[in-house]
Each structure stands twice: as structure tokens, then as C-alpha cells.
Amino acid sequence: MRLAGQAPDRFLAVPAQRPMSAKPAPALAELRPGQSIELLKALHILTRDGQLNQDSRRKLKQVYHLYHFIEPLLDEVFAASPAPTLVDHGAGKSYLGFLLYDLYFKARAAGRIVGIEARADLVAGAQALAGRLGFTRMEFLDMTVEQSIAAPVFPAQVDIVTALHACDTATDDAIRFGLAKRAGFMVLVPCCQAEVAALLRKNKNASFGKTPLSEIWRHPIHTREFGSQLTNVLRCLQLEAHGYQVTVTELVGWEHSLKNELIIATRRGAPRGNAAGRIEQILDQLNLAGLKPRFLG
């Protein structure tokens, strides 16, 4: 500060300036070695500046937890086949397929991932991203489940079928494809199982006179929850009827996702003897005989 009439100082004291803080480096310590930063940004697991926020950490935890279950299955199929095929059915934006390629397939000389999705715009977007990243052994097909089962692009038997948060009957489409292609493994995370709940609701009045079990789904919230539970029970029995050993577990903690059920099916070739009969009995007792073609076809 200079008083009035005072000659200016020759050298003014300049306060020391704090160095501009550079942006912190991406939280690479939390990522697996060699992961594509561009892919993680495209999937919104990393922010635009390469950081992890609370939401992206939650997503990353889910990704790694699911990968923890799939990695040993991939080890097994790669040990048995020089060029295995993984089909991600009802792939959406191919979130899971991209991550599996980045974490596992990218470092190997063979093996491919095929994403099947009925929405052409999502297929085009996934193709563009794979091209940008150089993921040359990823393919994306705009097909229905019927078209995919008949498509000559697939071998008679595929190694793994996945379906991550495939909504409503899309999980059943993945199972149909997996059964038709005698998949060695199926890894399913079902979502939004509305079909069974809708039929429970539609037949509710008739069910009241048929079975006291109808009290389980009398209230709307119970209809939704029981419908979801029942759908997955029927799916597990269906897989067992076709010779699969089934494991059902939590994908992540319930604080991360309410759609949290993970079904892993391993083809053993020995059907559970009473599985089909159990399906038929359940559908008859719950007044859902119209679902027999889906689960017993």
C-alpha cells in the first residue's frame, strides 16, 4: 500500500502465488491394468475428464463383481476351444460385451463376442464404438430371437450366452437361443419381469376361488414382487429340465441395485427328472396354464 504523495516503491512486494492445481489424474489405481479409458468414458463409468465419481464407482463395482463370476467360465471355454463364441443376447448398447472384450478377449488372439439386439440404432452405435476402439472381434447383429436361432453366422453350439438386465421376456429370448444353440454356459441378470405379473393380475379373481395361494399376490405390490420371483423360479426349472445345473446368487449388494438376481447355468446334459413336471404343476395351481408353451415348449 502506498500513501498519498509517497514515491512509488521500485520493487513492489508480490505475494507468492499458489501454483495452479492441475486436475487430478484419473483414478487408475481403481481400474484393472490395460483397461480402455475411452471405453469407460463412452460407457459413463468414467467422467469426461477421466475421473470416478460416486455413481461411476457404483457402476464399476457392479462391473467387476459380474466379471468375477464370468471370468472362470471364460477360462474354461478358452481351455476347451481355440476360438470360443460368446453371445450377448438382448445386448442393448452392448455394455457387458464391451467390458468382457476389454477385460478378457482383447489380450487373446482368438475368440469373438456377438451382440444381438433388435433395435437397429443401438446396433449401429455399438458397431461404431467397436470400430473406434479397434475391437475387431466384436460383431453386432440386428435380429429377433427367431432370426438369431436360424442365422448361419452362428455355429451349432455356442460357448456362453449372456443377458444383462434384459427386460421382461428378453431374458426368456436369451434362454431360448441358449437352449437352441446348446450353450455351455448361460449368465443371466433378469430385469422388469412384467409378463407373469400381468397374467397374475388378469386372472386374480378366478384364482381367488381356485387356491388360497392367491393371497400371495392379492395386493398390487405383492403381485409385482411375486411375479418377478415366480418368473425366475420357472426359468431355473426350465434350464434344469434341459440338462443345466443352475446357481442363483446376488449380483451385488441390494444398496446398488434392486434388480440383483444372477442366474448361472452350466450345461451338464443330465436333465433334472421332475423339473418339467414341477413347472406344469406350478402353472396349473397358480392359474397360469397359458404360460406352458413358454416354459415347457
Image (spheres, grey):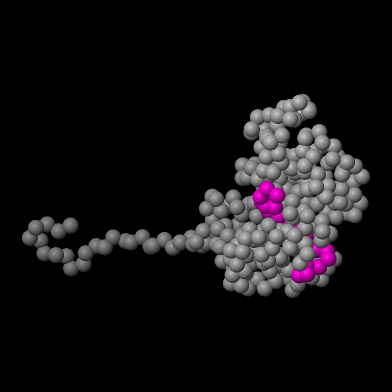
Residue 264, x across and y down, in percent: 78, 51
Q: Is residue 46 left or right of residue 23?
A: right
Quick one: 159 or 65, which is closer to the camera? 159
Residue 205 in the magenta stretch? The answer is no
Q: Is 180 in front, or is 198?
A: 198
Looking at the image, the residue that sits furthest to the left is 5
At 55% across and 58% down in the image, what residue appears?
44
Seen at 74% across and 73% down, the residue is 109
Q: Is residue 166 magenta?
A: yes
Q: Quadrant of the N terminus?
A: bottom left
Tell me: residue 124, above or below residue 170: below
- Image coordinates of residue 11 in percent, x first then y, are 21, 67
Residue 150 x, y percent position in the rendering: 78, 64
When the figure is inspected, residue 207 is found, relative to residue 89, above or below; the finding is above
Image quadrant of residue 275?
Answer: top right
Does 111 appear above or below 209?
below
Q: Is residue 2 left or right of residue 289?
A: left
Residue range corresponding to the magenta coloring: 152-170
Name the residue located 59 percent from the left edge and 50 percent from the top edge: 58
The answer to which image quadrant residue 184 occupies is bottom right
Asked whether the viewer can see residue 281, the reply is yes
Side of 244 relative to 165 (left or right): right
Please tell me which residue is depicted at 78% across the width and 28% down the height of the picture: 210
The percent position of residue 36, horizontal first and vertical second, equals 60, 66
Q: Is residue 79 visible?
A: no
